[in-house]
Image (cartoon, grey):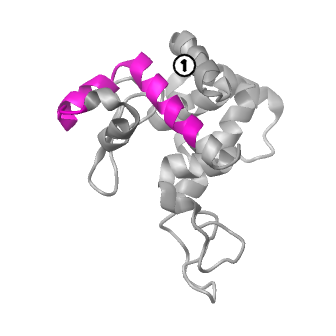
Amino acid sequence: MRVSFFLLVQGNHFGFPFGLPGFTLGLITDGLKSKVAAYDADILAAAQLYGVPPERIRAIIIAESSGIPGAQHQDLDGQSSYGLMQIRPDTDRGLDPNLQGLSDAQIAQRLQDPDYNIQLGTKYYGRLLNQYGGDKDLASAAYNGGPGANLPSRNCPGQRRWQCGWDDDAHTIPNTGYQVTRDYVEKIRLMEGGLT
């Protein structure tokens, strides 16, 4: 079931159409919950401390690392993200003043500690949530696509860069640069809804 679940999450729209019956969604939700159950105490403590719904934290952990504390991912800019909530060393330095003088390798090691990673990732997400007036989609877009994702779109008036599907005013060139962020925001929203 875990392998099937992982493949569903990695697929387009979790590998199932939106009209899927609730029973099947319930089975997937049980799989989601079991992935992060070992971290529930840390998640609940961080949720309370930083004002982030625990279901949102769980959804981010599943989307970012599939619940694997030693997960590492190389981002498009060549930098790496680490741990359950996939934090970059440069982000970590901005959130934890105790890291002055530590190398990226030392910070990466620290980020693989589940409690530390959950605390830091939730602190960061909580700041984004406050910055964007409690809008979870905008906070998720910034968490995944960086702060530039929420700048106004030049090609789609009234939308953010990540929301616009086009890279030109004539709407003939697809905006593939933020496709991952559009998918991520939708994935987090759907997963959180299945975890409530």
Residue in view at x 59 percent, y 29 percent: 57
Q: Of residues 63 and 12, which is closer to you in this image? A: 63
Look at the image and say whether residue 172 sits in the magenta stretch: no
Which residue is label 1 attached to? 36
Residue in view at x 68 percent, y 28 percent: 53
Is 91 displayed left or right of 16 in the figure? Answer: left
Q: What SS does tag 1 mark?
A: helix
The quadrant where residue 59 appears: top right
Rendering coords of residue 107 (x, y %): 25, 30
Look at the image and say whether residue 104 sits in the magenta stretch: yes
Q: Of residues 84 and 67, which is closer to you in this image? A: 84
Residue type at mark 1 is Val
Start and end of the magenta stretch? 100-127
Res. 26 visible in picture: yes
User: Please, what is the dominant secondary structure of the magenta stretch?
Assistant: helix
Rendering coords of residue 109 (x, y %): 25, 25
Residue in view at x 61 percent, y 22 percent: 47
Q: Is residue 159 above or below residue 83?
A: below
Q: Of residues 171 and 23, which is closer to you in this image? A: 171
Residue in view at x 47 percent, y 54 percent: 146
